Amino acid sequence: MGAFSRIRYVIAANVNALIERAENPEKLLRALIREMEDAGEDARLASAELLAEQTHLERVAGQLESEIAEWQERAEKAVETSRDDLARAALKAKAERADTLESVHDESSLLTDRIAHLEQDMTTLKGKLAEAKLKLKEMLARQEVRPAPSRREVKLSGNERKIQQAMGRFDRLQSQVERLEARVRSYEVGTVAPSAWDAEVDSNDPVIEAELEALKMKTFGQQSEAKQLESSES
């Protein structure tokens, strides 16, 4: 049973109902307490893993931002030397990294939500564990003064079905997190191969062409202002 299923299992359990219908309430309560403690440990480990994945995403995002700035600088230098082909290639590489960065930000937001939900369940679990320990303490105290009353044996299949349904809902969340973690690990940004700079870029891409024209206007406008300043000073 995974960490998410395990914590949801014990959260969904109705401690009072289980005790009332159990043949041996003390034995059941002790088993529940052990299960809660184990689930809490699993949840803490799962939370640590999610936080590590989030840290990884932050590192990837920072690297992508650096590469975006680098390709922007290359595009500007290409425009200054009238190499539109190289400028297009640089702007294309920049756009690809910008798209990846947006995806990374989306994944980071999903991770934040998952972590928040897990922490909320951990808080709920902590309360359930305290409740179960208190009930066990009260039960043992009553047994010291009088024998435990006989109880009618009742099968727990109905309660187990309810718990399994709750587990199923949380299992779906676990599957989403596992898919998310797989995507996170795929965001490994490495050095750009030289071919990315030399590759031909479709000159009919309207987005790239618009950005190229804007970059030309900015670059040549700055050069014109610089020349005017030099003329006025001379």
Image (tube, rainbow, N blue to C red):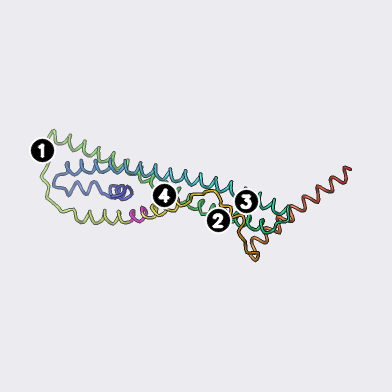
Q: Are marks 2 and 4 in contact (CB under 8 Å)?
A: no
Measure the alpha-carbon separation of dots 1 and 4.
Answer: 47 Å
Instruction: Residue at 26% x, 53% y: name it.
Output: 163
Q: Which residue is mark 4?
A: 114
Q: Which marked residue is nearer to the observer: mark 1 or mark 2?
A: 2
Q: Are marks 3 and 1 in contact (CB under 8 Å)?
A: no
Mark 2: which amino acid? Asp
Region of the chain picked out in magenta, as a range: 169-174
Q: Which marked residue is nearer to the observer: mark 3 or mark 1?
A: 3
The numbered mark, 2 or 4, whose residue comes first in the sequence reads 2
Give residue 49's position: percent from left, percent from top.
39, 44
Among the 4 quarters of the image, the one containing residue 88: bottom right
Instruction: Residue at 71% x, 59% y: name it.
Output: 213
Q: Are marks 1 and 4 in contact (CB under 8 Å)?
A: no
Where residue 204 is drawn, which disc sits there? none
Instruction: Residue at 68% x, 61% y: name it.
Output: 210
Q: Residue furthest bottom?
A: 204
Q: Which residue is mark 3?
A: 71
Instruction: Residue at 62% x, 61% y: name it.
Output: 200
228 on left or right of 39 = right
161 on left or right of 205 = left
Mark 1: which amino acid? Pro
Residues packed near mark 1 inside 10 Å, few (<14), some (14 to 19) or many (20 plus): few
Question: Is disc 1 placed on a helix, strand or loop?
Answer: loop
Give residue 33's position: percent from left, percent from top.
24, 41
Residues packed near mark 4 inside 10 Å, few (<14), some (14 to 19) or many (20 plus): some
